[in-house]
Image: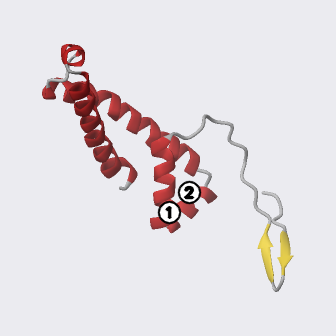
Amino acid sequence: MSELTYTRCGDYYIPNLKLSEQPEPPIGKYGRMRQRYLKEHRPGLYSSLILSEKLYPHLLEIDRAARERMDAMLPRMMEAAGVTEELKARDPMRWVGLMNTLKAQIDELILCELVYS
């Protein structure tokens, strides 16, 4: 382990810390929401994840899991609600309303189960 150096800032010495580079894909909607939640409501966990360099992989995992959950639940809920291509052709405004309702329901489940837990 290399020697830790400090920078003097007024009466305090601040350690010169630098995180390693992480060239990975950008974080999606749910990952950014999880990051904001951790930063505002769980600052200890947020700091711990940053210092251990596990925050970025954690956010990517939350985002991936949320997208998979959305992709798995939407077709099942569409079938249960009777949202079909026939309805889309017959009454497009009703179809759009139902789809928006289903997506909002799934989004709320994802937020409760993955983002805010």
Residue beneath the point at 63% across and 59% down = 51
Q: Quadrant of the N terminus?
A: bottom right
Task: Report the disc number at residue 45.
Answer: 1
Residue beneath the point at 60% across and 57% down = 50
CA–CA distance in space, label 2 to label 1:
6 Å
Describe the element under mark 1 as helix, strand or loop.
Answer: helix
Q: Tell me where residue 49 appears, x and y as whole percent.
A: 56, 57
Mark 1: few/some/many CA within 10 Å (<14, 14-19, 20+): few
Q: Tell me where residue 62 appears, x and y as whole percent.
A: 44, 43
Residue beneath the point at 72% across and 48% down = 20
Task: Report the disc number at residue 69.
Answer: none
Task: Report the disc number at residue 49.
Answer: 2
The amino acid type, in three-letter code, at marker 1 is Leu
Number of callouts in the render? 2
* Colour scheme: secondary structure
Q: Do the residues labelled 2 and 1 touch (CB within 8 Å)?
A: yes
Residue 76 falls in image quadrant: top left
